[in-house]
Image (cartoon, rainbow, N blue to C red):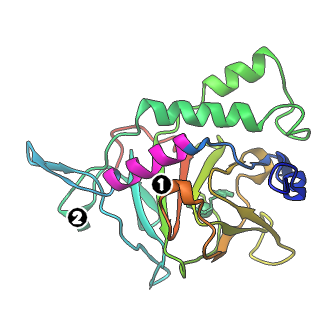
Amino acid sequence: MPALFSDADLVRQPREIYPGCVHVPGWLSMNQQRFLVGEFFRWGQTTPEREGISRGIPPHSPEIYGKKMSVRLTSLGWHWSDYAYRNDAPEFGGAQPFAVPDWLQRMGRQALDAAYQPSTAPSWPAFDGPQHAEWVSSYCPDVALINYYAPHASMGMHQDKDERSSMPIVSVSMGNTGVFRAGNSENKNMPFEDILLASGDLIVFGGPSRFMYHGVPKILPDTSPAELNFPEGRINITLRQTGLSPAGN
Ligand code: MD3
Ligand code: FE
């Protein structure tokens, strides 16, 4: 009975954390999460050269401010290196990322639709009805960054500002619960709001929250749902619209 009518469910409702930032706990079904975990393993594998170009960016720890990140990153659509998006990865023999699949772009639109309902996002965006539908269908994320956090990995406070488009960032999480820390848009300082991102959770960042400082100070051990079969670590997928032209490097 406790599992059927748990108090924990009271705080696992969709919630606007800041204007433009909406958390939707348990948005992905277990089947969707399992599928994404399977794709995660495929995305990290490089396919052999075809016409001189190999595809797939192996999971790696980018250097940031001269320090290796503890998170391992792979990506689709673009390769992120030295605070910029590139078509290829010179550090991996010129490998090019796999394309962002159609179904993942559709997931991004479904995420905007789910998060930005008048009931869940009272402050931003300030429109509804046909305008909302048109805006949602204009979302075309051309990059997916896929982070893997081992149990002791973390991500320091930062802003995401390498995109030229101000369309929202969509984030989904699988595996262990992560502590997500949200700050403000001016500096890395307090006050912070810490939010638990569990397996299957969606969180979107648009409008006034798009350029806020954020980080992941901690991964909580032994929190991955057993049915997922991904016992250790956390996967986070963020979808972004870069505003870059496909050929630009
Ligand atoms: C708020 N990833 O990849 S996802 C990142 O859990 C990143 O792996 C974290 O920060 C993670 O850059 C957080 C949630 C997130 C993503 C992008 C944001 C929050 C954001 C951009 C602007 C504001
Ligand atoms: Fe970020």
Number of other residues with Cα within 10 Å of mark 1, as a class: few under 14, some 14 to 19, many 20 or more: some
Q: Residue furthest top?
A: 130
Provide the residue designation for mark 2. 92
Does residue 79 appear anywhere in the picture? no
**Residue 232 in the image: above or below residue 101:** below
Q: Is mark 1 within 8 Å of ligand 1?
A: yes
Magenta part of the chain:
31-42
Residue located 61% across and 31% down the image: 109
**Amino acid on which disc 2 is placed:** Phe
The verdict on residue 104 being magenta is: no
User: What element does badge 2 sit on?
Assistant: helix
**Which mark sits nearer the N-terminus, 2 or 1?**
2
Q: Position of residue 80 (x, y in %)?
A: 41, 59
Camera-side residue of 236 and 200: 200
Q: Quadrant of residue 27?
A: top right
**Residue 113 in the image: above or below residue 197:** above
Provide the residue designation for mark 1. 145
Q: Position of residue 126 (x, y in %)?
A: 87, 32
Number of other residues with Cα within 10 Å of mark 2, as a class: few under 14, some 14 to 19, many 20 or more: some
Q: CA distance from mark 2 to mark 1?
A: 17 Å
Q: Is residue 43 left or right of residue 106?
A: left
Q: Position of residue 238 (x, y in %)?
A: 55, 51
